[in-house]
Image (cartoon, helix red, strand yellow):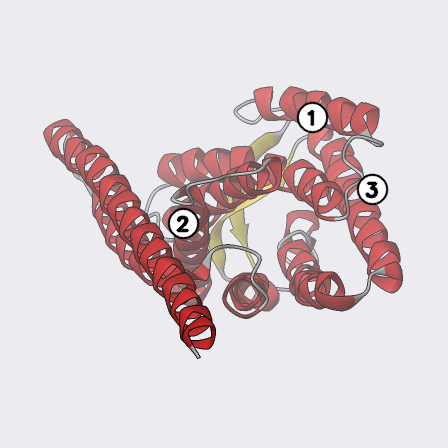
């Protein structure tokens, strides 16, 4: 059973990395895209650490990865809120709220490796190393995963009701994905408080990724002409990163980190080259179209 939940974390990490890299390789990135990249980075840290935590064979290793995943999970709600406000064009209007939320999140994150946040890990309901919350964790849970997430979903829903046309279609899939992903992520918390409700819903975090990918490909949130190249680069990058996580020695970490960094640079150059080729082709197509129109006019003048 535990291995199933570990795999859900791994899959969530994979999906987040791929989506984040697809957006990262876009030539033009707005604040909306930048925050989305950071959101997926936080989800990737949470997902991959979740996988390593539930795959751990010792108390200390499990406790370490629980605290690492807490760093990622701490930033997910505030990044989610910020991203939603950018989607509905209210980020500037709610700037004070966003800044305050980031400062509170940073404070919580600074305590991620302390006993105030996570006391320890213990066996519970078939899980050998499930975390025990510290006193600060209760405040974090209420502030981040109740207030911030609820406010973000509410703002998105209110904006969706007023939206029209393609904007409404985009928001429909974003809202659907996040409305499913939020309770899926929340399903991880009952066991923290001794409630026998295993996080079976955790796998539905992937629904958010699927919905946003559909919005990218079908609703033109991003330039889809280079998505195929970006996806390939992102997939290879993830495999290299997963291999890095499986390193056994410091030397392995060193050379695999170097290989990963080199591939990221090479992948960026590849995507950039493909984008330039596409732009050149579009210019040639436009020129040919204009030339054909001019030729038709000349024929009419000749007659």
* SS for callout 2: helix
Marks 2 and 3, the one that precedes in the sequence: 2
Q: With 15 as the anchor, is 248 left or right in this view?
A: left
- Compared with 181, 89 (above or below) is above
Q: Quadrant of residue 171?
A: bottom right
At x 83%, y 46%, the residue is: 151
217 or 206, which lies in front? 217
Q: CA distance from mark 2 to mark 3?
A: 27 Å
Q: Position of residue 79 (x, y in %)?
A: 64, 38
Q: Residue furthest front?
A: 303
- Quadrant of the image containing the N terminus: bottom left
Q: Position of residue 58 (x, y in %)?
A: 34, 42
- Compared with 233, 65 (above or below) is above
Say which mark, if any, is on residue 102. 1
Q: With 289 as the anchor, is 111 left or right in this view?
A: right
At x 56%, y 22%, the residue is: 114
60 or 54, which lies in front? 54
260 or 184, which lies in front? 260
Q: CA distance from mark 1 to mark 3?
A: 14 Å
Q: CA distance from mark 1 to mark 2?
A: 22 Å
Total marks placed = 3
- Compared with 274, 136 (above or below) is above
At label 1, counting other C-alpha atoms closer than 10 Å, the crowd grade (few under 14, some 14-19, many 20 or more) is some
| Residue behind mark 2 | 17
Q: With 238 as the anchor, is 293 left or right in this view?
A: right
């Amino acid at each position: 059973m535990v291995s199933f939940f570990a795999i859900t974390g791994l899959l969530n990490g994979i999906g987040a990395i791929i989506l984040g890299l697809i957006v990262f390789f876009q030539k033009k990135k707005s604040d909306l895209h930048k925050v989305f990249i950071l959101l997926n980075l936080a989800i990737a840290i949470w997902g991959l650490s979740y996988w390593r935590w539930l795959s751990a064979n010792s108390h200390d290793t499990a406790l370490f990865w629980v605290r690492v995943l807490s760093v990622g999970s701490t930033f997910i709600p505030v990044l989610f809120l910020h991203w939603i406000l950018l989607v509905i064009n209210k980020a500037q209007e709610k700037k004070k709220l966003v800044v305050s939320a980031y400062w509170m999140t940073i404070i919580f994150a600074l305590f991620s490796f302390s006993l105030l946040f996570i006391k320890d890990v213990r066996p519970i309901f078939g899980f050998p190393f499930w975390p025990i919350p510290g006193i600060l964790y209760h405040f974090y849970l209420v502030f981040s995963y109740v207030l911030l997430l609820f406010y973000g979903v509410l703002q998105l829903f209110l904006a969706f009701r007023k939206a029209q046309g393609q904007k409404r279609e985009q928001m429909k899939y974003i809202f659907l994905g996040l409305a499913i992903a939020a309770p899926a992520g929340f399903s991880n918390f009952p066991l923290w408080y001794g409630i026998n409700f295993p996080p079976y819903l955790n796998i539905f975090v992937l629904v958010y990724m699927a919905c946003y990918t559909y919005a990218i490909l079908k609703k033109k949130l991003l330039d889809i002409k280079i998505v195929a190249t970006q996806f390939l680069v992102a997939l290879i990058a993830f495999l290299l990163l997963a291999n890095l996580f499986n390193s056994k020695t410091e030397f392995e970490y060193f050379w695999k980190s170097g290989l990963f960094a080199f591939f990221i640079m090479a992948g960026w150059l590849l995507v950039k080259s493909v984008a330039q080729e596409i732009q050149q082709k579009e210019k040639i197509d436009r020129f040919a179209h204009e030339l054909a129109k001019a030729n038709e006019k000349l024929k009419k003048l000749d007659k």
